[in-house]
Every structure is written in structure tokens, then in C-alpha cells.
Image: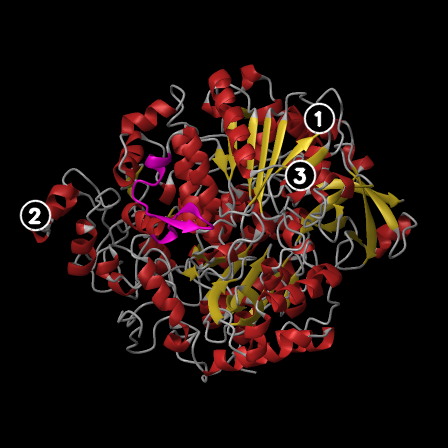
Amino acid sequence: MLLTRTSHRPAAGARGEGAFVDRLRHGLARALPTVDRRAFLRRSGLGLGVGLAASQLTLVQRAKAADKAAAGAGTGKVEVKRTVCTHCSVGCAIDAVVENGVWVRQEPVFDSPINLGAHCAKGASVREHGHGEYRLRYPMKLVDGKYQRISWDQALDEIVARMKQLREESGPDSVYFVGSSKHSNEQAYLLRKFVSFWGTNNCDHQARICHSTTVAGVANTWGYGAMTNSYNDMQNAKVALYIGSNAAEAHPVSMLHMLHAKELGCKMIVVDPRFTRTAAKADEYVRIRSGTDIPFLFGLLYHIFKNGWDDKAYIQARVYGMDKVGEEVMAKWTPDKVEEACGVKEEQMLRVARMLHENRPGTIVWCMGQTQHTIGNAMVRASCILQLALGNVGVSGGGTNIFRGHDNVQGATDVGPNPDSLPGYYGLAAGSWKHFAAVWGVDYEWIKSRYAEGMMEKPGITVSRWIDGVLEKNELIDQGPNIRGMFFWGHAPNSQTRGLEMKKAMDKLDLLVVIDPYPSATAAMAAMPGDPKDLNPKRAVYLLPAATQFETSGSCTASNRSIQWREKVIEPLWESRSDHMIMYQLAQKLGFDKELVKNVKLQKVKGMDEPVPEDILREINRGVWTIGYTGQSPERLKAHMRNMQAFDVKTLKCKGKVVDKETGYDLTGDYFGLPWPCYGTPELKHPGSPNLYDTSKHVMEGGGNFRANFGVERDGVSLLAEDGSHSKGADITTGYPELDHILLKKLGWWDELTEEEKKAAEGKNWKTDLSGGMIRVFMKNHGCHPFGNAKARAVVWNFPDAIPQHREPIYGNRPDLIAKYPTHDDQKTRWRLPILYKTLQQKNVEAKLHEKFPLVMTSGRLVEYEGGGEETRSNPWLAELQQEMFVEIHPAAAAQRGIRNGDRVWVTTPTGARINVQALVTPRVAEDHVFLPFHFSGRWQGQDLLAHYPQGAAPVVRGEAVNTATTYGYDIVTMMQETKTTICNVERA
């Protein structure tokens, strides 16, 4: 079967008024007034084979009643709004059919080059957000253990009063803001700006606990910390290595492209401690011990180096330090050591290495199975080194295809609330602040005055460790106060480790604000009784109903860096408000609203002022030069969404000359979604970069090379690319540093700037020149890359382990290997907090925890749910598909414990936690491993928390959160939490 898409879709300009909508209008007029269950399922396009909840039938009747005469006559207003699924990062497009303001139907977009008219179970059910039966409907306050409805005015007034009190007593660092990877780019950007004007870097979002190790590890290897190629480009691969990725469940629609590649002869290798649904599609499945990715990857490199299969010419021209890596691999990771550490025999290691050698180009895919470890940064760098050794980076069909989690976790990372950077990964040095002060049109000294002294340039606490920001002794924290106030702004607490301590930290807070379309597990955790000694009697807890992304407009960035624009489908339901409206309203009461929206127009939504998303994106375009978020104007993105049929499925490039009928914009040469970096101003018309570091293309056609971000030499060795290694058509045919005003003058190209551009560029570099003139001259006139042309780094000297080192987890069941591969030394201060490594690991060994807890516990995704699961478990369609939290346990391990399939069991861990789940006895896991999904919450150590949710807003399915029981452990570079390798025991309940 070849992947195809229909060619008879209505023209873009006709959407909303053509034959398609005409048929919908009359079809809906016939269906809605007399709908029954079977007819509704058939006509809605949602035939999931599940029951229709009575509440949904009620809502259908309401839709009919909204304008009965118009519906009956077939004259109701029918619109088709194009949007994007709000679940994983694939970026599946959806056409939402709206009649009289009610979302009545959805269709996958067959013209989308990304999802080709396909949906997974989650995508097929997003219309349920438009009904919102289990949503948080209005602001609420926790009073005497129960949530009570209050007005928006009361909620905002009381929250701001408490914020001001905390600021007065303890300073701005006492309040922490957890943003959301569900925010649009515009909302994520505005939140980082909001937090900066509040005066703290104590902000973060989900990327910290999913791919922060990827961002740090990959960026420090070759320049940008993102997916190098695309889901689509995998169709050009000859071999694909999935390691720590269960794409069939976590990114189901991405498998369309992989399965097509397999039809064309691509070999598929899956490496995972568990035999997953993805592994079922593999040509070669490799089971490794959880946490041993480096022994496996370096074991492959052993055979590659030994047999001379490395790409020596590529390495010589484009890679620094591979010789040092090779020496270590050959000495340290011989086949016997590899088998001892990860459990894979030499025969299979050689077979996999040969497959990678004989089938080039090859790509590698990883997800949280590789990132969520105390050595996650080293694991991802080992994956990068493997690809560099094979010459697979910067080529179509190759690269590191890093699958991100949430729909806009990539964009939120790029421009959102990171504690160590401003939008676009600009650091926190004074120069970066002055750049954004100019972009925002505010005084640098005013921003500085908002911060506590000395804290403006200091990275904040990470979300993974906000618990310790509350609980740690004050004298050990590298900031003035402990954390006293928390904003959970679209973030699931059950996605974080150390649940028992999190409950304690929540109870000690002075202020807890949850802003979410669904109340999230935060609401129930905050309301349920804890240890009375921990409860702060002055604590105030508020719930604010946020609108979903279907109730506003804005852009989102898929994992492949393509940006798509969502149209607003419906008005905000109940009393919910968009996130950017809430930010603006808080800023009004805090006194910096004019600064927040100085460059942004306001529009009326339900009679209230809301910042215009298009204007926020234009501000992003004006400031985020580092990663090329400057070329994707709202107008260009909207033209792409209207003309999806114009883009090639494999390359994402516009096929021939296509002109947008609505605006006259010429899409010729563009890549779909203008994947960043899309350099220069929108007028420069850079097409986007489909495959990073690709020297076979001109830079104005999406080509590039490795970034010169780490200096020009190291210990007398050049870090720049060798002679002859450059992007196609470049006037500079050797390595060169990044562009600044001095280099442009030395090259004699300065006078190619206009006089206005010269004024803006004087004393600046390509990242701070607001005119974009330097980029225009360097790229368009001379074919050179503004970030320079350097070698990728196999050796990253600024990390604790310059060459990736295998280290055993802090909680492990192999004391013999802990002795050989111990963890890091304790750190006095990392990200403002002390952190334990070796002392805790040794304490665990001495306590013989491996005897009490002999099973390795790991976690992962299910196809039915997403993230913390609150919104998907509140969806009746999905809830019916997966109703129980469970643990997968091997038949031998189950037999030893007297456990049968379907039994209730207790899973216990060294934290003292006990979670009650159902046993799934299966050989999918190894005998000494167990697996639990991480999407559940709503039960706490055997107790149902239903009574502690706001009335009517509890999820349909509730279950134990695996992270109630997970243990302490963090990556030394990023503070990524360790969720994939800890220890437990299982016993019958």
C-alpha cells in the first residue's frame, strides 16, 4: 500500500462556502433535529466503536435548540475551521465543522502533508473539547477542603493581592510559574515576558521533564537542540533505529511515514527494555536493560570502528574529537563489557552494526526512554556521535529524529518560559536582556529593577525540583526565599516524580493557582488531606478555567520544526478565558499591562480585551533571530494552511508555482510550515529548513552546516569546518565563525547594507541586528550561513563528562555494576539547589534496597491518553478504550509472587509509596522489569480522590499515578527527572 491523499478536495478559497460546506449544511440540518445514537455516530465521522455518553446527547440537543428554524431550513451558518490536534507533536491537521457556533463534526485534513488524512484515537476525539462536559467551568477557591465557585473579579483580586504580599515579604523569586507545552507559541512567549516583568527566572514547563536533556545534549553537539529532519523525511531512510521510542503509541501517525519507508525497503530496528507495539513492526528487536543506552550505542561503535565502517572523510571535514571517542570505545566497550552492562550478545550487536553500515542513509529516533535518566544528556550525545560516525547528519534520510511529546512542546521550548534563557535560547547575560528590552520597547533598567539584586542573570529553579525549592533548608538555596507561591499554568503534577514529597510541598505553600481547561490532578492533590503538620493554615488555592487551543487562534510548532496556524474554532466555553487574556488581566492588576502589550493590539472577546495573537507572533518575528523564528509571519503561515495540497509529502517542498488566492502570496520554494530556522525578515522569503546542516543545498534553499557556537579552536585544534566543507554555492568555501559587524566589514560586504541597516547593525551580531540586514547580505548575496561553519563536537568539554559515560542509576538492582559505573559526585549547587548523587546511591547499596525491591520499574505512554492524562481521561470516547491503570509483569516474576493476570496488586518503592493497580502478566517485559503507564491520576495509594475534585469536573477514568511512587534522581546538566529506571516490588493486594 502506498500512501496517497485525495486530490478532489475543495479549493482553499472555497472553504466555508463551497459544495462541501453546502452538503454539510443540508446534512446537518437533516441530522441534528432528529439525531439518534447510531445516526450521530455514522454522520459525525467519529465512529470509534464506543458508547455515546448521555451528557453528549444532551449537548447535541442544545446545539439543535440554538437555532431550530435555521437548522430545519438548512440555512444555519456552517463554517469549516482549520486547526491542529492538541495532543502529540506530529502536528495532525483537522477541519472542524461549526454550525451556529457549535462544533458538530471534524475531519482529518487529507491534504496535510503531515497526517495525510489520518488520525489516532486521541486526534479523532478532539471535538469533545468543544463540548467540555468535564471541564472546569468557572473560577473556584478551596474553602474548608471543598472547591467553591467565585467570580473572576474576586479570583483575580485575591490572587494578585497574595502575589503582592509574597513579593513584599520575600521578593519576586518566592513565586514560581510553571508554563505549558499546550500553550501556543504566542502564549508561551507572552508568559516568559510576563514572568520577566514580574521579576524572576523561576519559570519552566514540560520540556524540562521530557526533552531538556535532548536540547542540551544535541545543541552542544552541533548547534541546535531539535529534531534535525522530519517525520516525512524518514521515508527516504534506508534504516531506522528507534531507541527509547514507542512511536506506535506515543506518535501513532508518524508511523505512516515509517511504514511507507519499510515498503520501500527500509530496515527498522527497535531497541527497548520492553517489547512494544513499535517493536512488533521491527525487522530487528533488541532488548536492553533499562538505562544502558550508552553501552549499547558505544557497543555498536566498537564494531563500526573495528571494521572500518565509519565515514572517515565526513569525520575529517565536519567532526571534532571523534578520535578521542574512538580510543575510549575500543578500550572500554568491548563486546564482553557491553553484554555485561546492557545484556545484548556480541552476535546481535554485530548484526545491528552491519545493518547500519550497509543501509545508508540511516536515521535514529529517540524519545523519553532515552532522555529521562540521570545521564540523559550523555545518552543523547552518544546517539549523536553514532550518527556522526556514520556520516548520517545533514543528509536526507538521516539525522536524529527526536520525537517531542506535546503538540507545542517544541515551540514552548523555543520561545517560552525557560529558567535559563529568554525566547530563542538567548541567554540571561545583560546583552540578551538589552536585546529584548529593545524588542519589547521597554527600558532595560526598568526590567532590572523588577528583579532581586543579582538574580536577573541567574538561571532559575527547574520545574522538576520546585518541590525542593519549597522544602529545602533556606540556607542551602542559592536565592533569598524558599518558594511560597506556585502557578500551575497548564501542567500536570502527576507527570513529575516524588509524588509523596510533592503533596507535602503543596501543603506548605502560601498560594497555589491552577490555570487549566481541566482542573488537573493539582486540584485533587491540593484538596485531599495530608499530614496536618505540613498544612499551611494561610494557604490559598484557586482554580481558573482556561480556554483550550480550539477556543483561540495562534501558532504551534511540530516536532520537525514546522509551524502551523490554528484558526479559532469556537468561542470560549462556560466562563473560560484564553491564557493570553488571563496574562493580560493579571498584568493589569500588577501594574505592567502597558509594558506587556506595548507592541500588541487588543481585540474584544466576550466583551473583554484580549491581546491579538498575530501581533504577538510579529513581535516574535522581530526578536528571535537565533533560531530563525523571524520569517514565519502570520500571513505566510496562514497561506500554508490554506494550501496544504501544494506541498510534497516526502520533501515538504511546494510543488511548482502556487499562489495563495486570498492574499496573492507566492508559495514557490517554501517548505511546509517554514520549519525553523526560517532566517531573515518575512520579506527575505527564506523557505525554511527541512533538514538541518545539509550542505547539499544553498542556504537560501534550506541548506546549512554545523554551527560555530563554541569558539574557533580548542587546544590548538581548529573547530571550524575543513576546506571544501560548506553549503552549496557559498562564497566562503571553508570554515568560518559566526557573523557579526566586524566580520562583515573584513569581508568587504558591509556596504551592501542600506544606510538604515548600517545604523541598526553597527556594533551588533546576526542575533541582535533588528534590521535583519546582515543576514540578508550574508545569505542572499553570498550564500553563507549567519551562525558560521564549524565542526560538530564529539567531545563536549563544558559538560561534566566530555565523552558520554555510562553511570548506573541512583536506585538500581545491580550493586555489582554500581561499583563499576558509579554515579556523579554530589553537587553543592545546581540550578540554585544542592543535589545528591553518589552519597545517596551508596546509601541505597548499603541498605540492600536491591533485595527488598528487586524489580526495575519503568514507565511510558499508551495510545489512548496523553501526558498527565487529565484531559484525555475526561474524554468519554477515550475513557471507554482504557479504563484501568496497570502494571506489566513477566510471567515468571508473577508466578513467584502468586500473581495472576487481572489481579489487584500493590507496587511498592523505596519512597514508602504503595500504589494499587491491576496486574497485566505478559512477556513484553523482562523477568526483572515492570512497566507502568504514566497517564493516570485521581487515586492515591488505594484511595479514590473523586470527592476532592471540583464537582462535575473529575476525569471519567481515575487511577494511581506511577509518579506517586517514583524516586529521587536528576540529570546533572538539566535536572531532568529519572523516571525510566528505578526499583520496586510487586505483591498481591
Eyeballing the image, is 204 above or below 40? above
Q: Amino acid at mark 2?
A: Glu
Q: Is residue 543 magenta?
A: no
Write down the residue under mark 1: 843
Q: How many marks are shown on the rendered structure?
A: 3
Q: Name the secondary structure under disc 3.
A: helix
Residue count near mark 3 (Cα–Cα under 10 Å), binned few <14, some 14–19, many ≥20: many
Write down the residue under mark 2: 755
Q: Residue at x 68, y 47 (%)?
A: 340
In the drawing, does residue 793 fall left or right of residue 484?
A: left
Q: Amino acid at mark 1?
A: Lys
What is the quadrant of residue 315 in the picture?
bottom left
Q: Mark 2 and mark 3: span between their CA atoms? A: 57 Å
**Residue 779 or residue 487, whichever sits in front:** 487
Sequence-wise, which precedes: disc 2 or disc 1?
2
Kindly report which numbered mark, 2 or 3, lies closer to the viewer in this rendering: 3
Mark 2 touches mark 3? (CB < 8 Å): no
Q: Name the secondary structure under disc 1.
A: helix
Q: Name the secondary structure under disc 2.
A: helix
Q: Residue 523, labelled with which disc?
A: 3
Q: Is residue 601 magenta?
A: yes
What is the quadrant of residue 802 in the picture?
top left
Magenta residues (range): 593-614
* Quarter of the figure with the N terminus: bottom right
Sequence-wise, which precedes: disc 2 or disc 3?
3
